[in-house]
Structure formats: C-alpha cells, structure tokens
Image: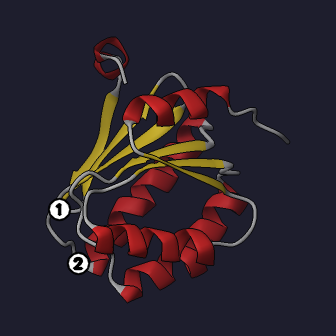
C-alpha cells in the first residue's frame, strides 16, 4: 500500500484487538494488534467493521494480520457461524484479502476460519500488502 493511499485513510475504531480504517479506494482495512485479544474485544472489533461497511457501502475487506496471535477456537466459531454470515447478508461483503501473519499457528487459525466460512465471501491470502490491495482494487463487485 502506498504512503499516499494510507494518508487518505480514516481511522474509524481502535481497541485491544487492533485498528479499523476506512480506505477510500473501496475497502475496510483491519490492522491487528500482536497481543491476544479477549473474545469480547474481537467481537467489538468486528461489529465496528460491520458498522463501517454498512455506513460506507464498502463490500471489500483487507485484513492485515502481521504479528497477530492465533484466534481462539471460540473466536473462530463466532466468526464463521455468526459474523461472516451477517457480513454477507447485511453488508453484502464479497471479498476479503488477508495479508498473512508470520506465526505458523496463526496461519492455521486463519485457514480454519477461511475453510469454515459459508459460501459468499471470497477469500484470498497474500504475503504482501501491495498484492492484497491490487487484488481488491481489481475485484469486480456483483449484485
């Protein structure tokens, strides 16, 4: 992501789980904190992502995992069983680019969420922010 692109972002929400930014080029960017967050903090974080998506009609997400700790089983279940279906149905989410974290255990928890997610949200995993952003910008919205 270019410095110019980041300069145009707006910080929308921040808690112990991380920061949520609105990227005017058409997506919500999640920047995860490295510390393990409580389920309640993760739920609050994602509820703010939903709020931002609904307010801006944004249907694309870029999740920058960095040094994020692996999600707990409860957080993974909540995402796949509750939040992702709501994001698809309420916010009409279509694309989620994931910039992989460094921890192999983190990558396993990410894979668990991606493979357990309901159909309707297209996930793609990347090793760099630039590749993730390029993919999102080229992703055509339907509906």
Disc 2 crowd rating (10 Å Cα; few below 14, some 14-19, many 20+) is few
CB within 8 Å, label 2 to label 1: yes
Residue 11 relative to residue 132: left or right: left
In this rendered view, identify the residue nearer to me: 35 or 59: 35
**In the rendering, which numbered label is found on residue 16?**
1
Above or below 20: residue 117: below
Quarter of the N terminus within the rendering: top left
**C-alpha separation, residue under disc 2 versus residue under disc 1:** 8 Å
Among the two numbered marks 2 and 1 on one chain, the one whose residue lies closer to the N terminus: 1
Q: Which residue is mark 2?
A: 38
Above or below 46: residue 25: above
Disc 1 crowd rating (10 Å Cα; few below 14, some 14-19, many 20+) is some
Determine which quarter of the picture holds residue 68: bottom left
In this rendered view, identify the residue nearer to me: 115 or 142: 115
Residue at image point 16% right, 60% down: 34
x and y percent of residue 72 in the render? 33, 83
Residue at image point 32% right, 54% down: 65
x and y percent of residue 31 in the render? 29, 47
Residue 6 relative to residue 50: left or right: left
Residue at image point 66% right, 27% down: 138
Determine which quarter of the picture holds residue 114: bottom right
**For the residue labelled by badge 1, is the local secondary structure a helix, a strand or a loop?**
loop
Task: Identify the residue at the far bottom of this view.
Answer: 74
């Amino acid at each position: 992501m270019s410095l110019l692109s980041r300069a145009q972002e707006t910080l929308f929400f921040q808690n112990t789980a991380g920061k949520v930014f609105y990227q005017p080029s058409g997506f919500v960017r999640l920047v995860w904190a490295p510390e393990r967050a409580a389920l309640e903090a993760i739920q609050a974080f994602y509820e703010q992502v939903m709020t931002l998506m609904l307010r801006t009609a944004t249907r694309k997400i870029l999740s920058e995992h960095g040094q994020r700790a692996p999600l707990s089983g409860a957080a993974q279940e909540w995402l796949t069983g509750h939040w992702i279906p709501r994001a698809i149905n309420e916010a009409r989410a279509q694309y989620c680019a994931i910039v992989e974290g460094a921890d192999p255990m983190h990558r396993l928890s990410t894979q668990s969420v991606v493979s357990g997610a309901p159909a309707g949200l297209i996930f793609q995993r990347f090793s760099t922010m630039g590749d993730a952003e390029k993919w999102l910008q080229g992703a055509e919205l339907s509906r």
